Image (cartoon, rainbow, N blue to C red):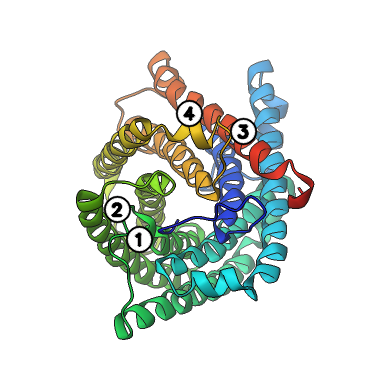
Amino acid sequence: MAASTTTDPDGYSPLYFLSSLGAGGLAVTFFMWLMHWTPHPGKSVPVFEDIAKAFEAGDLAMRAMLLLAVAGIVYYAVLNIKLLVWNLQRYRAWKGGGEHAKLIASNGETQLLALPLALGMNVNVLFILGLVLVPGLWSVVEYLFPAAIVVFLAIGVMVLRMLGRFYVRVLTAGGFNCAANNSFAQALPAFALAMVGVGLAAPAGLSSVAPISGAGLVLSTFFLVATALTGATALLLGLRSLLEHGADIETAPTLSVFIPVLTIVAILSLRQGHGLHEHFALDSGAGDRLMALSQFLSAQLLFGLFAGAILNKLGYAKRFVTGPESSPGSYALVCPGVALVVMLQFWLNRGLADAGLVAKFSFAYWALTAPGLALQFATMWLVFMLNRKHFRKPKHGC
């Protein structure tokens, strides 16, 4: 996600970290099935024991869903880890070369933030794997929350240092190429900041210990504000250049980057709201959640229509998805698909169902679930197509 992407088929780009990010996101989409379709009394998220109990008591359809959900989580979690390891190995070798030096002297320096973004997703994936596969994890989860805060803070420091180096360089020496910023590429830092924020918000929403929850609330708020300021700046700068120069086909997928950012911010807000209710007697209520989630979803759909129309006009898919050309920036297309799948699940379950507008597991409920499922499987197809294009050759080692 920068003004230019690597076009050399033998080259490496830090944008390949988005391949790991996308795989991790698909693991999360399968976890949504467990979270919203299986009972987990007394807990905000389902754990191994809840899944086992639901499997034992469930009918054939329930058992099939549970098996498919767990298999999907495990498959994409393994792919997430595999692609992260591959990227870290290639990144270390690439970092000392001339392409790295060229990148950090250009607008594209913010591509480097794909690294902490992928690391943040990986922490979330490992936590989901623990919940689903490790018996008794919930009994020691309060010991994990302080560790999670430390890990996400470390990733947050990495994000701030990378972003700080970029801002200090362009604000003291200049050199930012506004003409080449005809995309939303500079929103990648906002994406990384949001990922850190939502990770820090997990203890805020899940911990039963007030000081731990309070620490998560305060720290996640810092990264929420940083996300808003950085994202707004990138949006305005990108729109100005787009209006003057038009969209560049290789960076056009970045026009959808605010879709995943909005999903992450929405989940962050839900986690904060739950923590405020549990420990500080502040509850927004089902109606407030419905309105907030509807507003987030509305903004995402508008960004989706905007990006989709431009990508279609440019013929992006025919060239870089199903066609012969390749660009690591294509993996930016996975993020909005994953984000909309997750948002639709929250909107339906924490919005419409909690507000009493749709009965859980009714015909209307499944009719509203169907578009999200279709988008989930379409995103899985997209990941398959991109991985076959980018990683089937021996040079990529995957």
Q: Is residue 46 left or right of residue 173?
A: right
- The residue depicted at 56 percent of the width and 64 percent of the height is 115
Question: Which amino acid, mark 1?
Answer: Leu
Q: Which residue is mark 4?
A: 375
Q: CA distance from mark 3 to mark 4?
A: 15 Å
**Residue density around tag 3, few if under 14, some if 14–19, many if 20 or more, within 10 Å:** few
* Crowd band around label 4 with a 10 angstrom C-alpha radius: few (<14), some (14–19), many (20+): some
| Dots 2, 1 in contact, CB < 8 A | yes
**Closer mark to the observer between disc 4 and disc 1:** 4
Is residue 187 shown above or below 382?
Answer: below
Which one is closest to the eye, mark 2 or mark 4? 4
What amino acid is at disc 3?
Answer: Met
Q: Earlier in the sequence, mark 1 or mark 3?
A: 1
- The amino acid pointed to by label 2 is Asp
Residue 98 image point, x, y percent: 60, 73
Calculate the distance from the C-alpha at mark 1 to the C-alpha at mark 3: 43 Å
Spatial separation of the CA atoms under disc 3 and disc 2: 44 Å
Residue carrying label 2: 283
Label 3 secondary element: helix
Alpha carbon distance from label 2 to label 4: 32 Å
Question: Which residue is at the front of the view, 266 or 349?
Answer: 266
Residue annotated with mark 1: 276
Give SS at disc 2: loop
